[in-house]
Image (cartoon, rainbow, N blue to C red):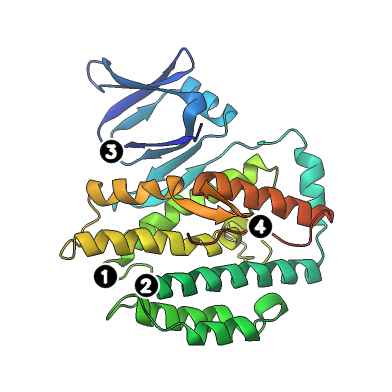
Amino acid sequence: MLKRTIYIGNPSYLRLKQHQLVVACTNTKEPKGTVPIEDMALLVLDHPQITLSTQLINRLMGNTVAIVHCDNHHLPSGLMLPMAGHSQLTERWRHQLAASIPLKKQLWKQTITAKITNQKELLAKYQQPTEAMNVYLQKLVSGDETNMEGKAANHYWKYILTDFQRERFGEAPNNFLNFGYAVLRSIVARALVSSGLLPAMGIFHKNKYNPYCLADDIMEPYRPFVDLLVLEYITLHPTEEELTQQAKAHLLTIATQDVLIDAKKRPLLVAVTTTTASLYKCFTGERRTILYPLMV
């Protein structure tokens, strides 16, 4: 059964009862709904008047449920994950930390190859020029020393959205993209922890202030799936610029989007765990390539 993403956008009191998340009224404590903890993957908290019991948090962490906290702008600002998500945690960290620089550069090349390939597929889906993307793929070298990722991104954003500049805090649909990427990052970080990997130690990203460098690496080929959801939404709602609950509900379906990975069609949430499991095998020498998704 595919794990669920639970979004809480109203004042609520969240507690645990008989292995279930109980969503209750803040004043009366009367239950409004329940969700089995074992069915959950993400819990998104998007209202300042939400209270959680410690028992509930313990149970969520014990089941590797990622808790995503949203700020006053309704964008994810915090992520809580269990310290230990795998029984062989120390051994797995040892393999990850021992990875050589040449191996990391090869893994980064594979990552950017998958990202540019998916960007190219999305451009083709919207009948936009893709020839330049083939050139960038051909010129890609170990570690992406010549920054083909950046050159491909310039071409991609130029054609995939009209009169658009990709910015962290820019005009719409940047806010839609930022929300989707933040949810995607949480999904990837959760999968890394489940595979016994250390999210802070990236293969390319290395900012000392970033606790999710590896998640930021591994999510790159998955970003175009968020872009597709945003494109679909703004096509249906061309005048909408606010990140409404309707828009967020649409973007939260990212976990259930179908992708093609290892020649099989899988929900994105499942595919991410396939990717992180293959990454670990690359660290141990059991595999030479990371399994990444293709757009279907």
Crowding at dot 2, Cα within 10 Å, few <14 / some 14-19 / many 20+, comes out as few
How far apart are the alpha carbons under marks 3 and 2?
A: 26 Å
Q: Disc number at residue 291?
A: 4
Please give the name of the residue rendered at 49% of the width and 17% of the height, measured from the top-left corner: 19
Q: Is residue 18 left or right of residue 112?
A: left
Percent position of residue 277, x then y: 69, 48
Q: Earlier in the sequence, mark 1 or mark 4?
A: 1
Kindly indicate whether the residue at mark 2 contacts the one at mark 1 (C-beta within 8 angstroms).
yes
Q: Disc number at residue 167?
A: 2
Q: Which residue is mark 1?
A: 171
Percent position of residue 136, x then y: 57, 84
Q: Amino acid at mark 3?
A: Gly
How far apart are the alpha carbons under marks 4 and 3?
A: 35 Å
Please give the name of the residue rendered at 60% of the width and 62% of the height, measured from the top-left corner: 217
SS for dot 2:
loop
In the image, residue 165 sits, relative to residue 180, either above or below, namely below
Crowding at dot 1, Cα within 10 Å, few <14 / some 14-19 / many 20+, comes out as some
For residue 74, say whether it is visible.
Answer: no
Q: Earlier in the sequence, mark 4 or mark 3?
A: 3
Q: Amino acid at mark 2?
A: Glu
Q: Amino acid at mark 4?
A: Leu
Q: Which residue is mark 3?
A: 9
Q: Earlier in the sequence, mark 1 or mark 3?
A: 3
Q: Amino acid at mark 1?
A: Glu
How far apart are the alpha carbons under marks 4 and 2?
A: 29 Å
Percent position of residue 245, x then y: 24, 46
Q: Earlier in the sequence, mark 4 or mark 2?
A: 2
Please give the name of the residue rendered at 35% of the width and 58% of the height, measured from the top-left corner: 229
